Amino acid sequence: MYNHDLKEIGSKLATAQSLPQNTNAYGDEGSKEFHKTLGAVQVKVTCNEAISIAATKKLEIEMYDSADDSTFAVVPGTKVTITDSTPSTYAADDVLARIGLPSSLRRYCKIRFLTDDASASGKVDAWLDFLPH
């Protein structure tokens, strides 16, 4: 019962998405409509396969929202930055981030990945994860 993920159909923001190399990319599943959740959900980001980031380089994960599904803006307080003075490596299924979503989230939401590492490698998954009450 514990340590298992229930992935609802249509809740994925990224599926086996390759890390961007020295650039940024939005989640390959596009934007999703999950506003009005009143803080009952988070976005969970895991490694689909092993990933690596060079020493002193970073991986940023951040949420964006929109009222009209065309003009997106950063959701304040959702940025997660992964960086280290030594190379960072993570195994398949490792959790990279759990990002809480505010109750003020606008209608559409998507995820963005950014690295400043030209040799970043690996793939990630991201999906809407319901918080137990």
Image (cartoon, grey):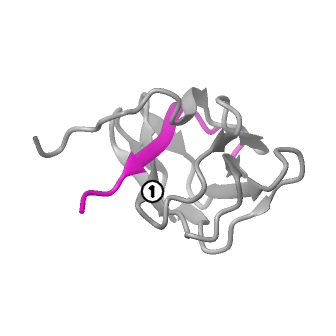
Task: Reply above or below: 70 against 60.
Answer: above
Q: Quadrant of residue 80?
A: bottom right
**Residue at the image position 53 percent from the left and 63 percent from the top:** 101
**Residue at the image position 37 percent from the left and 33 percent from the top:** 7
Q: Is residue 66 in view?
A: yes
Residue under numbered circle 1: 42
Give the mark count. Answer: 1
Q: Position of residue 103 (x, y in %)?
A: 56, 69
**Residue at the image position 89 percent from the left and 52 percent from the top:** 71
Task: Reply above or below: 17 against 82.
Answer: above
Q: Is residue 127 shown in magenta?
A: yes
Left or right side of 69 for 81:
left
Q: Quadrant of residue 63?
A: bottom right
Which residue ends up furthest to the left in the rendered image? 1
Left or right side of 132 for 23:
right
Q: Is residue 58 in view?
A: no
Residues in magenta, as a range = 117-133
Q: Position of residue 97 (x, y in %)?
A: 44, 55
Determine crowd level at label 1: few under 14, some 14-19, many 20+ residues with C-alpha closer than 10 A: some
Q: Is residue 64 shown in magenta?
A: no
